[in-house]
Image (cartoon, rainbow, N blue to C red):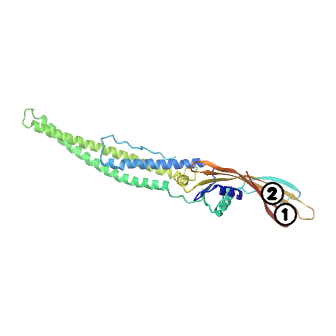
Amino acid sequence: METVADKIKRLVNDPKPSLLLTASADLATSDAAYGEVVGGLEELNAAADAILGPAAAQPEPPGAKVLPVAAVAGAIASAVPPLLSLLAPQRTLSSFAISPDTTAATALLADHLTQAGLAVQIDDFRPVPQGRVHDLEVALRQQRAKLVKEKLARDQARIEADNERASHQTEVDDLTKALDALKPDDPNYNDLQTKLKNATDERDESANATAQAADDVGAMTDLQTSIDTFLSAIHSVPANGTRSAYTLASLRQDLHDGPATRVVYISASGGSSDELLEHRFLVKDKFESIASVSVSYWVLDPSNGTIIAAGNAGGTSRLQGSIGGSITVESIDGQDG
C-alpha cells in the first residue's frame, strides 16, 4: 500500500486535493442514479413552476394548459489465510491461495494518504452529504405544499364558477320561456332578447371558468401524484439492494459538484502462501512461510472520466522460526506493476 500511496501522491497536484476511495469497480451504475434522481427532481420542480407561476393566476381557455411532466416514474444496491501447520510430523512444503482483505488494504491506503496531507473519504463509510440533490428535494417538497394549497383554491374557484353557471342557466331558461311567449312585434321583445343574450354570455363565461378550473385541478392532481410517486421511489431501497436511489445520488454528487478531485479504486486482487515445515529429531522443528499479496488500483479524474494512473502492486512477507522457539517476521521489497 505504500507503493500505491507513493504513486498517487505524485499524481495529485490540485490546490485542494480530495480523494474518494472506493472498492466498487462499477461507478457508472451508481452515477446513473445521480442523473436520474437529479433529472426527475428538476423536471418536477419545473412542472410545479409552470403550474404555480403567473400563468396559473390568469386562466387560459379550456385545454390550453399542457403540463411539462404528466407523470414521472420512480427509478429507477473477509478471507483469512490458512493457519500454518506447525505441528506436522514430517517435512512438508505446502502452497495456499489466499484471499487478501480489501478493507484492510483500503484502510492502509487511507492512512498513508492522510499522513501525506491529502483529504480522503472512504466511499462506504461517510455521512450522506447534503448538496444539490438535497436542495432539489427540499425545493420539490416545498413546491408540493404550494401545489396542494393552490389546488384547493382552484377547486373552490371551480365550485363558485359552477354555481354561477347554474344561476345564469336558470336565468337563461326563464328568459327563453318569456321570449318564446312573445311575438316579434311585441314592444318588450327586443329588450327581452338583449337580456337573454347577456345572460347567455355570462353563463358561457362561467362555464368556461368552471372548465378551466377543473382542468387546473386535474393537472395539479396529476402532478401531485407524480411528485409523491417519484419521492417514494427514490427513497425506497430495492429488495436486493442496500441503498435508495436518493442515497446513491447524494453520494455521487461529489463527482459532479466537488469536493472529490480524484477517485481511487482499490482491490486486493489475490495472493499466495508457501509454507515449509521441517521436523527434526530431538531438536525443535523449524518452519518458514512466505506470503505474497497483490492489489489492483486505478485513479479516475471525475472531471473528464479519464484514468490517469493504474497498475498492480505487490507485497511479500516472510515468517520463520522454530516450534517453541523464536519467530520473526520481515517484509520483502514490494513490486509495482
Circle 2/circle 1 CB separation < 8 Å: no
SS class, disc 1 = strand
Kindly identify the residue that appears in the image at 85 percent across and 60 percent down: 287
Q: Nearer the viewer, residue 290 or 77?
A: 290
Residue 300 percent coordinates (x, y):
62, 51
Q: Is residue 213 above or below residue 21?
A: above
Q: Secondary structure at mark 2?
A: strand
Amino acid type indicated by mark 1: Gly
Among all residues in the image, which is located at the extreme right? 281
Q: Residues within 10 Å of mark 2 (few under 14, many from 20)?
A: some
Q: Is residue 223 left or right of residue 25?
A: left
Residue at the limit of the structure toward the top, as seen here = 184
Residue carrying label 1: 321
132 shown above or below 180: below
| Disc ID at residue 290 | 2
Counting from the top left corner in percent of width and height, residue 291 is at: 78, 56
Q: Decide which of 307, 181 is in the foreground and name it.
A: 307
User: Which mark identifies residue 195?
Assistant: none
Within-10-Å neighbours for mark 1: few <14, some 14–19, many 20+: some
Nearest the eye: 149 or 335? 335
Which residue shows up at 58% across the image and 55% down it? 261
Q: Report the quarter where the N terminus lies.
A: bottom right
Q: Is residue 172 left or right of residue 320?
A: left
Three-letter code for the amino acid on which mark 2 is drawn: Ile
Q: Position of residue 16 (x, y in %)?
A: 57, 59
Residue 200, percent across and down?
20, 39
Splitting the image into 4 quarters, where does residue 186 fall? top left
